[in-house]
Image (cartoon, grey):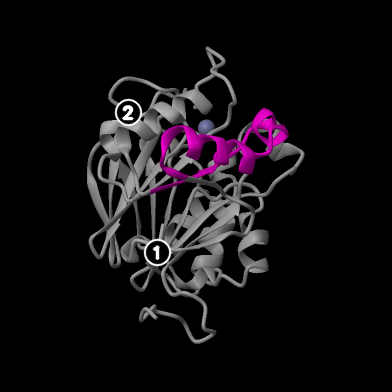
Amino acid sequence: MSARKTDENGTPADTITFLGTAGARFMVSKQLAASGGMWLDWNGTQVLIDPGPGCIVQATKRKLNAEKLSAIIISHRHLDHAADANVMVEAMTNGGFKKHGRLFAPADALGPEPVIFSYLKSYIEGITVLETETTYRAGNISFRTSVKHVHQVETYGMVFESDGQMIGYVTDTRYFEGLAKSYAGSDLAIINMVLTEPRPPVDHLSVPDVEKLLGEIKPKIAILSHFGMHVWQARPWLVAEEMSQKTGIRVIAARDGMKYDLAQLKEGQV
Ligand SMILES: [Zn+2]
C-alpha cells in the first residue's frame, strides 16, 4: 500500500475537483451540466480556476471551503469562466472580514468591463494581471501561462507545478501550430473540448484537434471537460474511450463533482 496523503476525513489530500463540465452557451444556460470551474487542492494550497455560473452552489454542495482559497485564477473573461468571480471573492474573504487571497486574470478581464466589482477589490490582497508565458505563484503552487490562445478575448491556459508534477489546463482556444508547446511536460492535461468536429470560425477545440494535441503533449493522462452540446449528445465518456484507443493515452471524461486524486500521477497509477 502506498502512503497516500489524506485529510481528516480520509479523503485524498491532493485533488482536483470538477465543479462543472459544461462548456459554451447552450450547455451552460440550460445547465445540462454544471459550470463552476475547477478547484485545485495541492500540496497544502487551494486555488479556484475559472469560476463559471453556479460555482458558489457547486463548491458549497461539495463542502469546499472558499475561505481556504489562496487564489482565484481566470483564464479569460467569458461568462462560463468568470460569472461567479465576485461571489467567490466574497466567499474567499468571508464577506471582506478576512482579507486575503489574490485574483489572477488577463488585462482585458479587468478593463472597462471588469469581471470583478470595484468594491470587492479591497477585500483581497491584490490583482495580478496575467501575461503570456510568465510564471506566477500562489502558496505552494506555481503556474506558468501559455502562449496567447486564439479565442476572441485575451485568453491564457496554464501549467500548474508542485512537487515535481505538472498539470496543464488547455482552456478555450482554436487549434493552432505552437499551441502544444506551452503544455509540453504535463503529467496530466485537462482539455476543454467543446466540439465534436471543427466548426470554423468557432474558436474551440474539437475531437480531432484534441487527438492531435495529445500526440504532441503526450501526457500520462488527459481529462476532457467543458463539453458543448454535440459532445454531450455523443456521451463524453464514450468519446474519451474512443480517443484512448486511438491515441494510446489514457483519456477520461470529467463528470460534475469528480474529484481526481493527484497522488496517482506520482505513483504511476494513471
Ligand atoms: Zn471562452
Q: Is residue 96 visible to us here?
A: no
Q: Is mark 1 within 8 Å of ligand 1?
A: no
Q: Element type at marker 2?
A: loop
Q: Which residue is mark 1?
A: 264
Point out which mark residue 145 bears.
none
Q: Residue at x 62, y 43 (%)?
A: 237
Q: Residue at x 54, y 72 (%)?
A: 65
Which picture quadrant has residue 171? top left
Tell me how many marks there are: 2
* Residue type of the residue flagged with mark 1: Gln
Q: Which residues are magenta?
A: 221-250
Question: Real-space Cα distance between discs 2 and 1?
Answer: 26 Å
The numbered mark, 2 or 1, whose residue comes first in the sequence reads 2
Image coordinates of residue 245 in percent, x first then y, are 49, 37
Does the magenta-highlighted stretch encompass residue 16?
no
Does the magenta-highlighted stretch encompass residue 229?
yes
Image coordinates of residue 106 in percent, x first then y, are 37, 38
* Residue type of the residue flagged with mark 2: Leu
| Horizontal relation, residue 228 to residue 8: left or right | right
As displayed, is residue 75 above or below residue 215?
below
Of marks 2 and 1, the one in the foreground: 1
Q: Residue at x 62, y 52 (%)?
A: 255
Q: Nearer the viewer, residue 176 or 217?
A: 217
As displayed, is residue 28 above or below residue 67?
above
In the displayed orientation, state which residue is furthest to the bottom.
8
Q: Is residue 90 visible to us here?
A: yes
Split into 4 quadrants, where in the image is the N terminus?
A: bottom left
Image coordinates of residue 31 in percent, x first then y, are 74, 44
Image coordinates of residue 161 in percent, x first then y, are 28, 56
Point out which mark residue 179 bears.
2
